[in-house]
Image (cartoon, grey):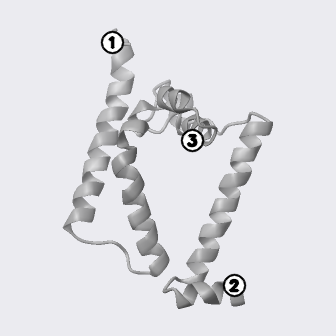
Amino acid sequence: MRFFGAFARLGLCPRRVQSALILVGVGALYALETQTLGLFVPCPLHLLTGFKCPACGITTAILALLHGDAGTAFAANPGLAFSLPVLGPYLCWLFWGWLRQHPAEGRAVNLVGAGLIVYFAVWGVLRNLAPLMGLV
Protein backbone atom coordinates (compact mmCIF):
# COMPACT_ATOMS: atom_id res chain seq x y z
CA MET A 1 0.00 0.00 0.00
CA ARG A 2 3.06 2.19 0.25
CA PHE A 3 3.06 2.67 -3.53
CA PHE A 4 -0.43 4.17 -3.54
CA GLY A 5 0.32 6.23 -0.42
CA ALA A 6 2.74 8.26 -2.53
CA PHE A 7 -0.16 9.22 -4.80
CA ALA A 8 -2.19 10.36 -1.78
CA ARG A 9 0.65 12.70 -0.82
CA LEU A 10 0.42 14.16 -4.34
CA GLY A 11 -3.26 14.93 -3.82
CA LEU A 12 -4.51 12.04 -5.94
CA CYS A 13 -7.08 9.48 -4.86
CA PRO A 14 -5.19 6.16 -4.49
CA ARG A 15 -8.25 4.06 -5.39
CA ARG A 16 -8.77 6.06 -8.59
CA VAL A 17 -5.09 5.77 -9.50
CA GLN A 18 -5.39 2.01 -9.03
CA SER A 19 -8.48 1.95 -11.28
CA ALA A 20 -6.68 4.01 -13.93
CA LEU A 21 -3.67 1.66 -13.87
CA ILE A 22 -5.97 -1.35 -14.32
CA LEU A 23 -7.66 0.39 -17.25
CA VAL A 24 -4.29 1.16 -18.85
CA GLY A 25 -3.31 -2.50 -18.42
CA VAL A 26 -6.51 -3.70 -20.09
CA GLY A 27 -5.94 -1.22 -22.94
CA ALA A 28 -2.36 -2.46 -23.38
CA LEU A 29 -3.55 -6.08 -23.47
CA TYR A 30 -6.19 -5.17 -26.07
CA ALA A 31 -3.57 -3.40 -28.21
CA LEU A 32 -1.27 -6.42 -27.94
CA GLU A 33 -4.11 -8.80 -28.82
CA THR A 34 -5.11 -6.79 -31.89
CA GLN A 35 -1.50 -6.75 -33.08
CA THR A 36 -0.85 -10.45 -32.56
CA LEU A 37 -4.21 -12.03 -33.41
CA GLY A 38 -5.77 -9.26 -35.50
CA LEU A 39 -9.07 -9.46 -33.63
CA PHE A 40 -10.90 -6.15 -33.25
CA VAL A 41 -14.09 -5.37 -31.37
CA PRO A 42 -16.54 -4.45 -34.14
CA CYS A 43 -18.73 -1.36 -33.97
CA PRO A 44 -22.28 -2.44 -33.07
CA LEU A 45 -23.85 0.47 -34.99
CA HIS A 46 -21.94 -0.42 -38.13
CA LEU A 47 -22.87 -4.10 -37.76
CA LEU A 48 -26.58 -3.31 -37.36
CA THR A 49 -27.07 -0.43 -39.80
CA GLY A 50 -24.05 -0.30 -42.11
CA PHE A 51 -23.46 3.33 -41.08
CA LYS A 52 -20.20 4.41 -39.48
CA CYS A 53 -20.45 6.05 -36.08
CA PRO A 54 -18.16 9.01 -35.28
CA ALA A 55 -15.82 6.61 -33.45
CA CYS A 56 -15.49 3.97 -36.19
CA GLY A 57 -11.79 3.51 -36.95
CA ILE A 58 -10.45 4.83 -33.64
CA THR A 59 -8.74 1.53 -32.73
CA THR A 60 -7.05 1.42 -36.12
CA ALA A 61 -6.06 5.09 -35.82
CA ILE A 62 -4.58 4.68 -32.34
CA LEU A 63 -2.62 1.58 -33.31
CA ALA A 64 -1.31 3.37 -36.42
CA LEU A 65 -0.23 6.35 -34.30
CA LEU A 66 1.56 3.98 -31.91
CA HIS A 67 3.52 2.72 -34.92
CA GLY A 68 4.20 6.29 -36.11
CA ASP A 69 1.97 6.01 -39.20
CA ALA A 70 0.02 9.27 -39.24
CA GLY A 71 -1.31 8.72 -42.76
CA THR A 72 -3.06 5.47 -41.86
CA ALA A 73 -4.37 7.03 -38.66
CA PHE A 74 -5.83 9.94 -40.60
CA ALA A 75 -7.38 7.60 -43.19
CA ALA A 76 -8.97 5.46 -40.45
CA ASN A 77 -10.78 8.38 -38.80
CA PRO A 78 -10.10 11.90 -40.13
CA GLY A 79 -12.62 13.42 -37.72
CA LEU A 80 -10.59 12.22 -34.76
CA ALA A 81 -7.39 13.62 -36.27
CA PHE A 82 -8.92 17.08 -36.65
CA SER A 83 -10.32 17.02 -33.10
CA LEU A 84 -7.13 15.90 -31.31
CA PRO A 85 -5.76 19.41 -30.62
CA VAL A 86 -8.90 20.13 -28.57
CA LEU A 87 -9.99 16.63 -27.53
CA GLY A 88 -6.61 15.54 -26.12
CA PRO A 89 -6.09 18.39 -23.63
CA TYR A 90 -9.80 18.37 -22.72
CA LEU A 91 -9.76 14.67 -21.82
CA CYS A 92 -6.52 15.11 -19.86
CA TRP A 93 -8.11 18.00 -17.96
CA LEU A 94 -11.16 15.89 -17.09
CA PHE A 95 -9.02 12.89 -16.16
CA TRP A 96 -6.75 14.95 -13.89
CA GLY A 97 -9.79 16.36 -12.09
CA TRP A 98 -11.20 12.84 -11.68
CA LEU A 99 -7.91 11.58 -10.19
CA ARG A 100 -7.87 14.46 -7.70
CA GLN A 101 -11.58 14.03 -6.85
CA HIS A 102 -12.12 17.64 -7.89
CA PRO A 103 -14.10 17.40 -11.12
CA ALA A 104 -13.42 20.01 -13.75
CA GLU A 105 -16.34 22.40 -13.80
CA GLY A 106 -17.27 25.79 -15.06
CA ARG A 107 -18.30 27.52 -18.22
CA ALA A 108 -15.17 26.59 -20.21
CA VAL A 109 -15.58 22.88 -19.47
CA ASN A 110 -19.22 22.99 -20.53
CA LEU A 111 -18.53 24.99 -23.71
CA VAL A 112 -15.68 22.75 -24.86
CA GLY A 113 -17.69 19.62 -24.04
CA ALA A 114 -20.75 20.88 -25.90
CA GLY A 115 -18.59 21.95 -28.85
CA LEU A 116 -17.04 18.47 -29.05
CA ILE A 117 -20.46 16.81 -28.91
CA VAL A 118 -21.72 19.00 -31.76
CA TYR A 119 -18.51 18.42 -33.75
CA PHE A 120 -18.74 14.62 -33.45
CA ALA A 121 -22.47 14.63 -34.23
CA VAL A 122 -21.84 16.62 -37.43
CA TRP A 123 -18.84 14.41 -38.27
CA GLY A 124 -20.97 11.28 -37.80
CA VAL A 125 -23.59 12.57 -40.25
CA LEU A 126 -21.08 13.89 -42.82
CA ARG A 127 -18.98 10.72 -42.93
CA ASN A 128 -22.09 8.75 -43.91
CA LEU A 129 -23.56 11.32 -46.32
CA ALA A 130 -20.36 12.07 -48.26
CA PRO A 131 -20.24 8.70 -50.08
CA LEU A 132 -23.97 8.94 -50.87
CA MET A 133 -23.50 12.39 -52.40
CA GLY A 134 -20.45 11.32 -54.40
CA LEU A 135 -18.00 13.47 -52.44
CA VAL A 136 -15.62 10.60 -51.67
Going from N to C along the chain, the mark reached first, 1 or 2, is 2
Badge 2 is on which residue? 3
Residue 135 tag number: 1
| Front-most of residues 104 and 130 | 104
Q: Nearer the viewer, residue 58 or 68?
A: 68
Residue at horizontal 57 percent and vertical 29 percent from the top: 47
Amino acid type of the residue that numbered disc 2 sits on in the rendered structure: Phe
Q: Residue furthest right?
A: 36
Marks 3/2: CA–CA distance: 30 Å
Q: Nearer the viewer, mark 1 or mark 3?
A: 3
Is residue 4 placed above or below 50 in the rendered structure? Answer: below
Q: State which mark lies toward you, 1 or 2.
A: 2
Give residue 114's position: percent from left, percent from top: 26, 53
Q: How far apart are the alpha carbons under marks 1 and 2?
A: 54 Å
Number of numbered labels in the structure image: 3
- The residue pinned by badge 3 equals 62
Q: Of label 3 and label 2, which has the lower sequence position?
A: 2
